[in-house]
Amino acid sequence: MHRVTWAYQTLLRPLLFTTPPEWAHTQALNVGRFSARNPRLLRYYQNLAVPPDQSVCLLGKRVQTPVGVGGGFDKDAEIIPSLGSLGFGMVEVGSVTQKPYAGNPGVHLTRAKRQKGIVVNYGLKSAGAAVVYPRVAAAYLLPRPYLLGVNLAPSNDGSCTTSQQAARELAAGIGQFDAVCDYITLNLSCPNTACPQPFQDPLELPLLLRELPAISTPILVKLSPDLPQGVVSNLLHLLEREPRIHGVIWSNLTKLHKPAELSPTPGGLSGPLVLPHMLERLSWSRKQFGDRFTLIGCGGVQCQSDYEATRSAGADAVQVVTGLIYTGPLIVRELLGGTPKPHEVKKQDGH
Ligand SMILES: Cc1cc2nc3c(=O)[nH]c(=O)nc-3n(C[C@H](O)[C@H](O)[C@H](O)COP(=O)(O)O)c2cc1C
């Protein structure tokens, strides 16, 4: 363990955990905003955080590591260069919705400390696409050793009530961000919205696929770890036939595991309880569809053995969110430190 990680886990994290989680998240964003304006600080982070010789080719570009930061940490694209300096090979901002939304009423975040997770009830809080767009466009012009991804979701402010509207909103977002990012993620699986997420229903998904504009930017879809196997199979067979869909992110938050001590808290849970579901979906997808999809493993990856299990299950890359909080800001180094180069990681089933 790097000494900075040790200091974070021993001194700073216990202090942060005495504060409300949303406040702590805001402070992390403040540090990120400050750092983004200080190139010397970014270089310092970069030297600490990035293990040597871990670059990989992902979605057609060479990136510094196969570890990304998933949707939800930098919802409004405020700290992209700071996240890049922590060694991430993918920086995914969002979820971004067309209309701004302040988030669901009530508590947005609750720590599930024993489970090393967070119960999340933001409900697609977003500054809105018009505010986020210029920030993403500016970051896209920077020289970067990471992919810049935009995670899109239908607005949750009450204005988007039918599947048709949701499909049109996602299509509008794709058209808007196409020229200023390296990939687009369609978040089809937010567990905290007023209306259920329609496009995880194999009968509704074709409606979205028909609306997709003709773009060359790779599109990934992000699915729930709670979907029954039969539904997963039907969805992936539909996605397989759509050339604009390049990959799948397994997965979003779970609603199946609510820690008993937090039972009245609304929301979906992140962290290690998602990991076994994510691994199962990932290895099934790899076995079933070979190399058709770029597969990203996301859910509870917080240490090197989680990372290795996810790569062995067939992930081309791994994303983390909660690990930034429990493991610390040098999580990329902690996941990769001492591992063989990515192409030497043994994968199951010949992949
Ligand atoms: C605070 C927080 C906010 C999140 N917001 C989003 C979001 O806006 N869009 C999204 O696709 N996923 C969101 N997620 C889900 C994460 O991207 C990820 O799929 C999930 O937390 C599992 O990974 P983890 O255990 O590494 O956090 C959020 C997660 C957390 C913890």
Image: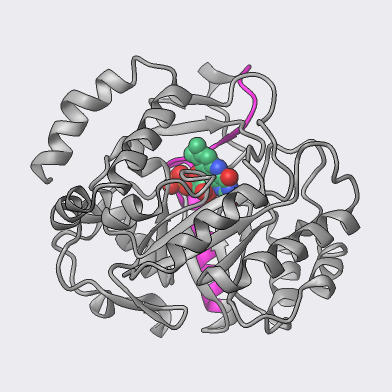
Residue 224 or 10: which is nearer the viewer? 10
Which quadrant of the view contains residue 183?
bottom right
Q: Is residue 259 left or right of residue 211?
A: left
Task: Give percent across and percent down for residue 105.
Answer: 69, 22
Q: What residue appears at the point 46 percent right and 43 percent down from the top-left corner? A: 73
248 to 164, vertically: above or below: below
Question: What x and y, as percent, mark residue 139?
Answer: 43, 61
Which percent across, then down, holds residue 132? 58, 51
- Mark yes or no: residue 201 visible: no
Is residue 152 in view?
Answer: yes
Q: Quadrant of residue 124?
A: top right
Quadrant of the drawing holding the N terminus: top left
- Locate residue 147 relative to residue 192 in the image: left or right: left
Looking at the picture, does residue 196 appear above or below residue 93? above
Residue sitting at the far left = 3
Q: Is residue 246 magenta?
A: no
* Residue at screen point 57% across, 83% down: 292
The mark tally for this picture is 0
Does the magenta portion include 279? yes
Residue at 35% over, 65% down: 89
Quarter containing the C terminus: bottom left
Task: Give the answer, above or below, for where 145 lies relative to 194.
Answer: below
Q: Quadrant of residue 288?
A: bottom right
Residue 145 position, x and y percent, is: 31, 70
Q: Is residue 268 left or right of residue 100?
A: left
Q: How is the image coloured?
A: one colour
User: Which region is colored magenta?
Assistant: 264-287
